[in-house]
Amino acid sequence: MEKIPILRMGPFLLVTIQVDLYDRLALNLEADLIKTISDTNAKGVLIDISVVSIVDSFMGRIIGNIASMSKILDAETVVVGMQPAVAITLIELGLPLTGVHTALNVERGMELLRAKVNLDDYSSSEDEDGYEPDDQRDY
Amino acid sequence: MEKIPILRMGPFLLVTIQVDLYDRLALNLEADLIKTISDTNAKGVLIDISVVSIVDSFMGRIIGNIASMSKILDAETVVVGMQPAVAITLIELGLPLTGVHTALNVERGMELLRAKVNLDDYSSSEDEDGYEPDDQRDY
């Protein structure tokens, strides 16, 4: 399975990173994602990295690239579920992920995207969102 | 990354299978999913297998088990994005996935779940859903 699925959820795209993003896979993801955004006219991209425990400069750069490319295509990018160690590493690597929005979990990321693209016709799941910050990573 | 993330989306849980479900990983997923359902009182489980191109009797059985366990915990299970070859294989393996609902893609799966649990307070994304059956697998 040499492909990371891109799930369409209403006006947003959801990508869950579960495997190590080695070069080809990452570049394929970039290309697929950009193609999907232009094909579906998606307004936002949600990238879940809750199971990513190790990040290197390459992966950080890929995420930054995806955000920049999406921005050009008028789609916001939100990275959710980042583990503290990953955040520390990214900063120590000098990759502050400029232009990338972050959220604690998918639901909050969705709310952030909805707010950013002003999609009031999409119901908020705030009332469902009553758990602790690290729950997502516990599952 | 020896863990398949379980994403909470409102009252539903979303699992994307991207890697081969070898024994331990599959059993961990089973356990994590059941724990998450009971912890979050989720009403439905959405399993995306759009990038799964090879399925064996073990994986088929695991999906069946998850559906049965979820059912006991009052959560419906919907498998989405199944490739035709996988459907053929499952039937040829004698695994009709009884008790498992299926849908073409995540959006339709969500609609199916909403219909099953009668969650009228969640907005339908039907209007966003205007693409071809195999689009999901193309991305």
Image: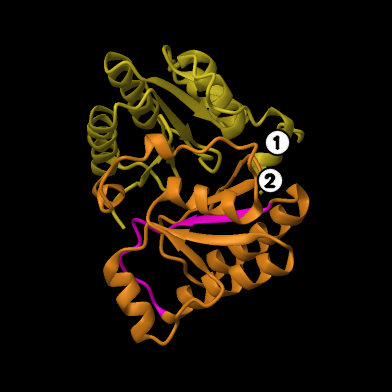
Chain colours: A orange, B yellow
Is residue B118 shown left or right of residue B29?
right
Q: At which x and y percent is residue A59?
A: 46, 73
Judging depth in this view, the residue of B46 and B133 nearest the camera is B46
Q: Is B18 located above or below residue B60 in the figure?
A: below
Q: How far apart are marks 2 and 1 (CA)?
A: 6 Å
| Residue, disc 2 | B138
Q: Position of residue B125 (x, y in %)?
A: 65, 31
Query: Is residue A50 one of those drawn in magenta?
Result: yes
Q: Is residue A1 visible?
A: no
Q: In this view, does B103 lie above or below B118?
A: below
Does the magenta-highlighted stretch encompass residue B123? Answer: no
Rendering coords of residue B55 (x, y %)? 46, 34
Q: What element carries label 1?
A: loop
Rendered residue at 42%/22% (across/down): B77
Task: Work out whether residue B11 or residue A69 is closer to the camera in this orientation and state it.
Answer: B11
For badge 2, the amino acid type reads Asp
Label 1 neighbour load within 10 Å: few <14, some 14-19, many 20+:
some
**Disc 2, SS:** helix
What residue is shown at x 51% (from left), y 65% (from top)? A101
- Kindly identify the residue that appears in the image at 55 percent across and 39 percent down: B50
Q: How crowded is mark 2: few (under 14 residues within 10 Å), some or many (20 or more)?
A: few
Residue B86: quadrant of the picture: top right
State which region is magenta.
A43-56
Q: Mark 2 lies on which chain?
A: B
